[in-house]
Image (tube, rainbow, N blue to C red):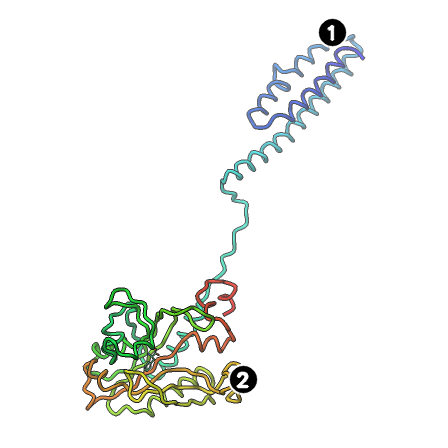
Amino acid sequence: MNAPYERLEQLEQEALAALESAMDSGALQEWHRLYLGRKGELTSLLRLVAELPEDERPTFGRAANTLKATLESAYEQRVETVRRQELERELARGALDVTLPGRPLGPGHLHLTTQTLRRIYAIFAEMGFQVYEAPDVETDEFNFELLNMPPHHPARDMWDTFWITDKVLLRTHTSPGQIRVMRERYPEPIRVILPGKCYRYEQITARSEHQFYQVEGLAVGHGIRMSDLIGTLTEFARRLYGPDRRIRIRGSYFPFTEPSVEADMDCILCRGAGCRVCKYSGWLEIAGAGMVHPQVLRNGGYDPDEWSGFAFGMGVERPAMLQYSIDDIRLFYGNDLRFLRQF
Ligand code: PHE
């Protein structure tokens, strides 16, 4: 084989090797200029044709053209590859990839507590109760004193308290709202519920959180009696848990009601027969309640000789736990979506 042919083969190997090591578009341009450009290697090789005997020239010409075509298609391929690599490098640096499919945005839903609260609001709304909101940060006066618990009253021990200063605290129950509504509404009759978060300085366990919701109820009017309280709670339980629910009243003690009671409902699981949920008593506690104490009416501006009223306070999480067989109250506010998504 003679020199021009050898040169041709050499050039092919050299050019293809150089192409493989061209890593960016600048290097590719340079390569193209060097091998395929007007003053490039291939062009100068074609000039060697003149040195060949006449009858070999067509063969050499064809071989040179084949090489040109080979180099051009190798170049096109390499351009594609390098472009893709450049794009990948850019993406790796954090640039936006508009070709990525979007992330689905699932619709959210209401928290189980909010759902439960709204069911409670709807039922009491049908019975003529308005929703009234009172502050979470309360004073000793409203949380205790005006509810018949002067400083050092032993009943204060029923509520372990988060104190902010020695006169300011996080409400331990929604009952201070009773005084606020009365002072705002006097001399009108009252029928309200007061939902909200309560706070207790307690050990957190599966059964008790230090933050939880209550719904307070308050009715003040002329001639309101215990039977109105029992009727209201019975109607509420039936609308929330089914028409054949029964309510039981037990004597109890709260400083701000007289008489005071505890209201139970027959167990939603065993319907009174006794089971694990009701601890084999057949009954579930739903509210602390009673007739508003005369002194509390007076503190709210209502004369107890003319006015009377009932009040109740019920938990929100516990009934939801019973309904859905949730065995740990901490799940409510643990922000674990696997739990929350179920409701
Ligand atoms: N505030 C009481 C509690 O937290 C419940 C209650 C409210 C009792 C209204 C009587 C009347 O335990």
Vertical side of 335 occupied by 128: above or below: below
Residue on which the image places disc 1: 51
Residue on which the image places disc 2: 275
How packed mark 1 is, by other alpha carbons closer than 10 Å (few <14, some 14-19, many 20 or more), is few
Residue 217, quarter of the rendered image: bottom left
Cβ of mark 2 under 8 A from ligand 1: no
Q: Is residue 160 left or right of residue 92?
A: left
At label 1, which amino acid type do we have? Glu
Specify which label sits upstream in the sequence, 2 or 1. Answer: 1
Vertical side of 88 occupied by 8: above or below: above
**Image coordinates for residue 297, horizontal then vertical, percent:** 22, 84
* Label 1: element kind: helix
Q: Residue at x 73, y 14 (%)?
A: 7
**Image coordinates for residue 245, horizontal then vertical, percent:** 46, 88
**Image coordinates for residue 228, horizontal then vertical, percent:** 33, 90
Q: Nearer the viewer, mark 2 or mark 1?
A: 2
Q: Is residue 140 left or right of residue 10?
A: left
* Label 2: element kind: loop
**Image coordinates for residue 15, horizontal then vertical, percent:** 67, 21
Q: Residue at x 59, y 19 (%)?
A: 33
Q: Nearer the viewer, residue 47 or 134?
A: 134
How packed mark 2 is, by other alpha carbons closer than 10 Å (few <14, some 14-19, many 20 or more), is some
Q: Residue at x 24, y 81 (%)?
A: 148
Vertical side of 52 occupied by 111: above or below: below
Dividing the image into 4 quarters, which one contains the N terminus? top right
Q: Nearer the viewer, residue 7 or 62?
A: 7
Q: Nearer the viewer, residue 59 or 101?
A: 101
Q: Is residue 309 left or right of residue 262?
A: left
At label 2, which amino acid type do we have? Cys
Quadrant of ligand 1 in image: bottom left
